Image (spheres, rainbow, N blue to C red):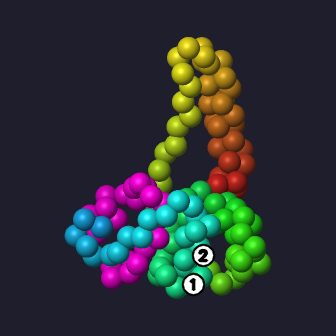
Amino acid sequence: MYGKKVGVVRGGVYGAQFEKARDENKLTVIEDNSPTQRLLMLLHERVDVALIGSGSAGFNSALEQDKTLSGRGDRFFVAEKPLTRDANYIGFAKSMKASQIIEEINDAITEGYASGELQKRIK
């Protein structure tokens, strides 16, 4: 991506190699607030690359949220390999005493990975 204008979510972090390239001004980072904005900028050639989280699901969701993008998924190339993987966490206030629900969420995630269903949904 050296030499390219890259659209990213404001405040996002995309791995050590990307951040090093950003710090060394080897690419131009354009920040925005949503994947839909990023894809519109890509469609109108204001950026060369758009980084979208949540894999294909995030890409498809962004397309569905805008009438200009709807039906234009074929105008974009989506890389098979993600730039980085970023763990996400669910948090609850201690006052909620949510240990039971956390256990249920953890069990659902474990079962989802074991069955392969979760991997299908987060491509």
85 vs 91, nearest the viewer: 91
Q: Is residue 81 visible?
A: no
Q: Residue 118 appears at what percent x and percent y?
A: 68, 48
Query: In which quadrant of the rendered view does residue 111 lie?
Result: top right
Q: Is residue 108 above or below residue 78?
A: above
Q: Is residue 7 above or below residue 93?
A: below
Q: Residues within 10 Å of mark 1 (few under 14, many from 20)?
A: few
Q: Residues within 10 Å of mark 2 (few under 14, many from 20)?
A: some
SS class of the residue under badge 2? helix
Mark 2 highlights which residue? 40
Asked if residue 65 is among those painted magenta in the image, a careful observer would answer no
Query: In which quadrant of the rendered view does residue 28 lie?
Result: bottom left
Asked if residue 9 is among those painted magenta in the image, a careful observer would answer yes
Q: Residue 117 appears at what percent x and percent y?
A: 72, 49
Image point 49% across, 64% down: which residue? 32
Query: In which quadrant of the rendered view does residue 91 lie?
Result: top right
The kind of residue on which mark 1 rests is His
Q: Residue 67 appears at what percent x and percent y?
A: 75, 73
Q: Is residue 22 visible?
A: yes
Image point 49% across, 45% down: which residue? 87
Instruction: Name the outermost residue toward the left.
Output: 24
| Residue 71 falls left or right of residue 18 | right
Identify the image quadrant of the N terminus.
Answer: bottom left
Pointers 2 and 1 in contact (C-beta within 8 Å):
yes
The tag on residue 55 is none
How far, Cα to Cα, is label 2 from label 1? 6 Å
The magenta region covers 1-21
Mark 1 highlights which residue? 44
Image point 53% across, 17% down: which residue? 94
64 vs 86, nearest the viewer: 64
Q: Residue 38 appears at what percent x and percent y?
A: 55, 70
The kind of residue on which mark 2 rests is Leu
